[in-house]
Amino acid sequence: RYDAAPFVPEGAGLDVLRRAAADCRGCPLHRAATRTVFGAGNTDARVMLVGEQPGDQEDRQGRPFVGPAGKLLDRALAEAGIDPAAAYVTNAVKHFKFTRAEPRKRRIHKAPSLREMTACGPWLAAELALVEPELIVILGATAGKALLGSSFRVSQVRGTVLEEEIHGRPERLVPTVHPSAVLRADDREQAYQGLVADLKVAARALG
Ligand code: URA
Ligand code: SF4
């Protein structure tokens, strides 16, 4: 069975947690990826942003949202009135999953399976328990399914404040689209404005 739980130290602080995650073998994704990309930010952050999984750049640099999607996200957050540097940023799955069209060619992102998302859940639960954010921003369908279950549909709930119990704790969540979806959209400007509008709901909920 895929499960990160045996690798998660109990009662650990963020640094110990991050070091332990570097050696996680809870599912097969650690084999092909370069490294674990753990969450980044302070444990006193008021808002936690949850993405899908690290991309190519994140896998190389070891930090979440440092590639093109992250740059767009930072711009949208700032425009919505949320300081990107004050947020805790992480992903539902902590290893990059990819395919290659040909050997030694560019690595192409592949969506994680439900089993991999579930396996990686204990890391996200540990991050939530440490950071205790006032608000969680869900970036896209994978993060939504990981936190709220497989019936999650981003189009139905984006830009609204949800109140749900997550890993045994009452949480407030604002779902929105994934910044990579904005980069792929036919009408990029409209998709970007939609992301900013949702993030403004999050900013207002934070007060
Ligand atoms: N996309 C994500 O979901 N997370 C990252 O860290 C980068 C791109
Ligand atoms: Fe562990 Fe998650 Fe990486 Fe799988 S994706 S090996 S569960 S850290």
Image: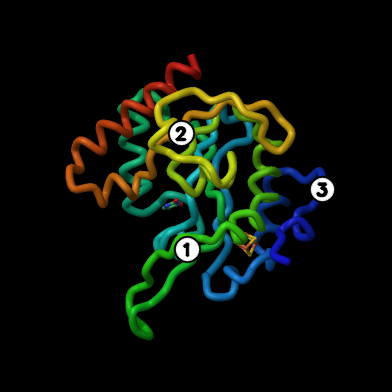
Secondary structure of the residue carrying tag 1 is helix
In space, the residues marked 3 and 2 are separated at their CA atoms by 29 Å
Q: Which residue appears farthest toward the right when viewing the image?
A: 10
Nearest to N terminus: mark 3 or mark 2: 3
Q: CA distance from mark 2 to mark 1?
A: 25 Å
Disc on res. 10: 3
Q: Position of residue 135 (x, y in %)?
A: 55, 27
* Quadrant of the drawing holding the N terminus: bottom right
Residue depicted at 44% across the width and 69% down the height: 98
Kindly identify the amino acid type of the residue bearing the numbered disc 3: Glu
Mark nearest the camera among 2 and 1 is 2
Q: Image height check: is 60 above or below 117?
A: below
Q: How far separated are the C-alphas under marks 1 and 3?
A: 26 Å
Amino acid on which the number 1 mark rests in the picture: Asp
Horizontal relation, residue 198 to residue 189: left or right: right
- Residue 88 sits in which quadrant? top right
**Image position, residue 100 (x, y; %):** 38, 77
SS at badge 3: loop
Q: Callout 3 environment at 10 Å: few (<14), some (14 to 19), or many (20+)?
A: few
Instruction: Specify the quarter for ligand 2.
Output: bottom right
Which residue is label 1 attached to? 59
Q: Mark 1 near mark 3, Cβ–Cβ under 8 Å?
A: no
Packing grade of label 1 (10 A; few <14, some 14-19, many >=20) is many
Nearest the eye: 31 or 153: 153
**Residue placed under numbered mark 2 in the picture:** 175
